[in-house]
Amino acid sequence: MNIAVCIKQVPDTETKIKISDDKKSIVESDINFILNPYDEFGVEEALKLTDPENITIISLGPDRVTSAIRSALAMGAKNAIHIKTDSTPADPGITADALASVLKEGNYDLIFTGKQAIDDDHAQMASLLAEKMDIPAVNVVIKLNVENGTVMAEREIEGAHEIFECATPCIISAQRGLNEPRYASLKGIMGAKKVKIEEKDVTLSESNLEVVEYNYPAEKAAGKIVGDSADAVPELLRLLNEEAKVI
Amino acid sequence: MSGIKPSFSKALFSGLIMEDLVFPYPKMDKEEAENIKMIVESFNKFAADKIDATQIDLDAKIPTEVIDGLKELGFFGLNTPEKYDGFGLGSGGFTKMLSAISEVDSSVSLTIGAHQSIGIKALNLFGSEEQKKKYLPKLVTGEMIGAFCLTEPGAGSDAAGIKTKAVRDEENGYYILNGSKIWITNGGIADFFTVFAKEELEINGEVKEKISAFIVTTEMEGVSKGKEESKLGIKGSSTTEIFFEDVKVPLENVIGERGKGFKIAMEVLNSGRLGLAGGTLGGFKFIIKTTMDQITQRKQFKKNIAEFEAIKKKVAQMTIDFYVAESMIYLTTALVDRGDVDYSLESAMCKVFTTDIAWTGVNECLQMAGGLGYMKEYPYERLVRDCRINMIFEGTNEILRLFIALSGVQERGEYLKKIGKALKDPIKGFGLLTDFATDWVKDKIITERIREVHPSLTSSKTQFENYSKNLRFSVERILMEHGRDIIYREMITTRLADAAIDLYAMIATISRVDTRIKEIGEEKCDKEIKICNTFCEQAWRRVRRNLLMIDKNNDDVLKEISEFITEEKEYPFMTE
C-alpha cells in the first residue's frame, strides 16, 4: 500500500507572533518552526499501515520547510517531496491545486493530512484535495481500519461516533486520538538525513483570497478572585451571570 | 617535546594571546545544528509526556519507563561515533543536549551525562578496537549503562591516592581486583564500570605502583553495590558505593596503556567538565524563565516586582553571567572539536565559572520569588538543591582553581628556566599537571595584542590586553618569590586562577559579540554589546584587585585566625 502524508510546517505553539509593518504577514525571522502536530498523527498512522519504503512525505513551501520534512522522515518514512515555493500561500486553494497535481502523479492508495494546520486553522485541505482529485475524503478521523482496499474511518460527532466506509484511494484527515505519534529517535533522525528529498517546482494558481490585514487579539483583562470559600459562591454566580454572561 | 598541543590559557599566563584559537567565535555547522534542533524537539515532546521533575525529586528515583524511553530514543549513544552505532555528536552538540535535558530535569541529565561524559568516555577515547566493538554497541543502546569509578573513601580531590589494587596474574590471564569506590553516579543502574586501580609495574628495573584503567562489568563475580545514597539534590540520579572483592578482570580489559590510568582519568574529566557546565546552564535557564513569570506578575506596593531597581540589578547580573558562561562553554567545546588544542585549563575554567554563577543566580531566583521560592510547591528550592553539587563533583572548584593556576605557573616557569632566567627552583611534578605549550608557542605567530575588534568593543579589548600582560608579570613575580613552594600558597594561586578565569571569560565574550556584530550588524547586537562591555568592566576590576592582592593581602592573619579556630575546634568567643 502506497501512502502519501501531506504535512505543513507551522510556528511552534509557544511562538510570540509578530505582525509585519504592512500588516499583510507575520514576521518569520524569530519563529521556531515545527511540524504541524495534527500531521504527526497522519505520519504515525501511515507507519502503522505500511512499510516505511512505501510512505512519501509531501510538503509545500519555502526552503525552511525541509526541516519539517526531516522531522516527519525522522519518525520513519523513507520518501519525501518538497514542492518549492517562495512562501506559504495564504489561500488553501492554491496549496491544494499544487498538492493535487503532485499527488496525481503518484500512485497512492491513501493520502493523509492533519485535520487542520495550527497556524491558519483553515481545516480545508482534505476536502479541497478530495474535490480536486475526485476521490472521497473522511475528515477528523479518530480510528482507521484498512483492509483489501476498503477503508473504515471513524469520527466523533456531537454525542455519537460515525463510521464511514469507502474504497481506496481516499483522503483521511487525522484528529488527535487516532494514535500516539512516536518520538523521533536518534536513529530515525540519522536515517532521515540519508533520504534524498525530491524537489518539485510548480506554477501556483491564481489566488481567490486576499489577506486584508493581520491584527493582534485584544488583550485579555486580568482575572478576578472573588473569594476562597463557599461564601464566595453567590457572588461568583452573580458575576458569571451578569458580567461574564456565561450562565 | 612531541605531541604537545597549543593551549590558549597556558600561553596567556605568559602574556601571549593566541588569537586564532578564539577568533572568530565558532559556529556549529548547519547540519549538526539542525540535528540538535530535531533531537531537542523530540526530547521535549517525550519530556512533556513522560518526565515529571517534581515527582522524580520526591520519589528519589527516575521511573523505569523514562529510562527505557530514553534508551529507545537513543540518548545513551549521543557522543559515541556513528561507526559504533552512536549518534556521533561533537562536544558542542553533546553539551547543548545536556543543557536541553537539564532544562527539564537535572537527575535525568546527570544519568545520561555521567554515562557518556565519564562512564564510557575512557573506552571511547582510549579503548582498543576489540574493546569498542565488544561493548559500545550495547552501551549506545543503554542495554548496558556506564559509570566512572575513581573516587574512594580516602581519595577524592587527591585522586592519585587511590587504594584499589589490581594484581596481575599473567598465567591465568586475569587481574585480581580488590577495593571499593564511593559516590558513584549511576552506581545502582550501571553494568559497565571504568575502574581506576593501582598495579605494580616495572619501570627501568624498579617496581612502582601505577594507576591503570580497567573495564569491569557486573557479570564478573565479586562486584557488588551499596545502598542508594540519600542526597541533598539530584535525587533521581543513582549514587552508590561499588565494591570489588577478588574480581577476576581479564588482562585484555585494561583501557589504554598500563600505568597511564591517571592521565586517562584526567583526560576524561577534562572533557566531562564541559558537559557538566552545559548541564548547569540548562537548569539555570529553566529557573530564569520561571522567575520571569513570577516577577512580572506578582505586585507589591502596586508595582510588578520586576519594576523595582533591587530586582532589576539581580536580573541584569544573572543575564550577563549566563551570557558569559555560555560564551566560554561553546568557545571551549569548539576547541575540543578541533582536536588539535589542549583545552584542559579552559574546560576547568568553564566548570568553575559556570557552576559558581549558576549557584549565585539560582539562589537569587529563589530570593526574587520570596517566601514562595522557599515552598516545595514551586521548583526554586529543588533547583537550588540540584545545583549545589555542581561546585563539588568532577573536581571541586577549589582543586580546579589550583589546577588552573599551577598549570599556568608551571608553563611560565619552564619557559623562564629554558631561557636561563634566574629561578629559585624549577617547578616540576605537581602530579596533576601534564604538558607544556611553550615549545609550540614560540614557533607560532603570537602577539600581545589582538588585531582588531569592532569599535564598540575596543575598551573591553584593551582591558583584556592590559591585564593579560599584568597576569604574566604577576606569575613571574610569584615564581621569583616562592619558587616551587607556590604549590602551598593557595590563597595566592586562587587569586591567580580567578584572574585567569576572568580573562578567558572576557575574551570568549568579546569574540562572540564581535563575531555576531560582523554577522548581523551592530544595531541588532545592542544588548549583547552592552552585556559584553559591562561584564568586561566588572571583570578587569576583579582581575586588578586579585593581582594586586597577590602582594598586598591579609593572608597571614587569615591563616592565623583559621589555625586558632581549628585548634579550638569550636567558635570560642562570647559576648559579654
Image (cartoon, coloured by chain):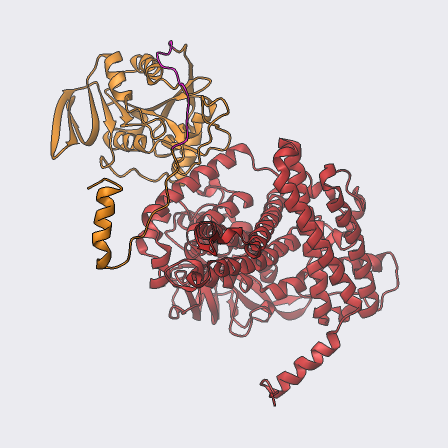
Chain colours: A orange, B red
Q: Is residue A122 magenta?
A: no
Give whichever of B168, A70 is nearer the camera: A70
Give whichever of A91, B96 is nearer the camera: A91
Q: Is residue A103 left or right of residue B401?
A: left
Give whichever of A179, B488 is nearer the camera: A179
The vertical placement of B177 against B438, above or below, is below
Res. B325 visible in picture:
yes
Tell me where residue A46 appears, x and y as whole percent: 27, 29
Q: Is residue B215 left or right of residue B198?
A: left
Tell me where residue A67 appears, x and y as whole percent: 44, 30
Q: Is residue A40 left or right of residue B305?
A: left
Res. B195 visible in picture:
no
Q: Which residues are magenta?
A: A205-217
The vertical placement of B512 against B362, above or below, is above
Give the residue drawn at x 23%, y 20%: A109
Q: Is residue B92 left or right of residue A242?
A: right
For the C terminus of chain B, the quadrant is bottom right
The vertical placement of A203 against B539, above or below, is above
Tell me where residue B100 appears, x and y as whole percent: 46, 47
